[in-house]
Amino acid sequence: MSSDLVLKTEDLTKHYGGVHALEGANFEMKMGEHIAIMGDNGAGKSTFVRQITGVEQRTRGKVYFYGKEVNFTGPLDAREAGIETVFQTLALADDLDVSDNLFLGREKTKWNFLGPFRRLDYKAMREDTMAGLVKTGVKIPNIRNSIANMSGGQRQCVAIARTATFASKLTIMDEPTAALGVQETAQVEKIIATLKAAGEPLILVSHNMRQVLDLVDRIIVFRRGRMVADLKVSETNGEDVVAYITGAKTGAQFEGAA
């Protein structure tokens, strides 16, 4: 296996009883790449992401992460391996502030020598939060505000900052701008561009054609649970991608997949 591969799947498949939500997905991602996953509703995009991140257990197939075969039993396993994911649900705690959300489940503590009497290190977590926001270009006026008092765009940016702050190896974003306005979408896209400039690999699940063509290197198209195209952005266009999404066109290497 090539040493520059971040992620590789072989025959990745997920069946729900008689429903074949994902069938035989063979996927490769190299260091520093930004790849978009596209397709109509129910095409298998989110199913593919859930198998990679251990949210669901695959029916069959193999997943390799940085050259090592992995079998994540849950999303915590994937996170510990270095995969951070922003799901559509965001998974933020409304009553907590920015720092508490960034460090939810991995809080920093002090006085650890006191065992059960150790304390949360709020100062260290706030400092690391500010560093994470700077890294991603996220601007939050007051990180001590609770998430409940923030706009949809700010909430999304917090979720992305949390992901980017801890993603040492791979970031996955599932429709990160689906519910956002123009200005908020632009802020999220700026974060993605910042990660690209830093050479950090990213998988973007999106319906936004303009966004995809502007931000990624390659586009993987799913249709009816199967991969039907693997396109270089520099060699394709929106009409071409739509043709694969609708089934009007199928790549030679994927003949019979639709």
Image (tube, rainbow, N blue to C red):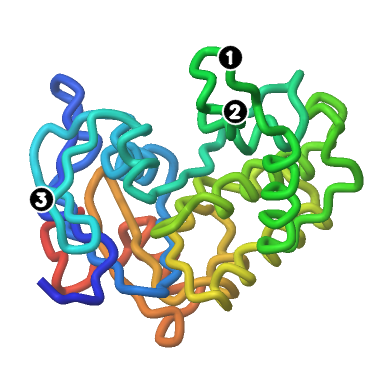
Check if mark 1's residue and mark 3's residue have beta carbons within 8 Å: no
Specify the amino acid type for callout 1.
Phe
Say which of marks 1 and 3 sits in front: 1
In this view, 97 is above or below 33: above
Q: Quadrant of the N terminus?
A: bottom left
- Judging by the rendered image, the residue that carries numbered circle 3 is 11
Check if mark 1's residue and mark 2's residue have beta carbons within 8 Å: yes
- Judging by the rendered image, the residue that carries numbered circle 1 is 117
Distance, label 1 to label 2, CA atoms, is 8 Å
The circle drawn on residue 111 is 2
The answer to which image quadrant residue 154 occupies is: top right
Q: Residue at x 22, y 50 (%)?
A: 226
Q: Is residue 90 visible?
A: no
Q: Residue at x 67, y 49 (%)?
A: 128
Residue closer to the observer: 233 or 132: 132
Specify the amino acid type for callout 3.
Asp
* Residue 184 x/y as whole percent: 79, 52
Q: Is residue 76 left or right of residue 4?
A: right
In this view, 151 is above or below 257: above
Q: Secondary structure at mark 2?
A: loop
In the image as oriented, which residue stretches furthest toward the top? 116
Distance, label 2 to label 3, CA atoms, is 48 Å
In the image as oriented, which residue stretches furthest toward the front? 113
Q: Secondary structure at mark 1?
A: helix
Q: Is residue 199 left or right of residue 8?
A: right
User: Sequence-wise, which precedes: disc 1 or disc 2?
Assistant: 2
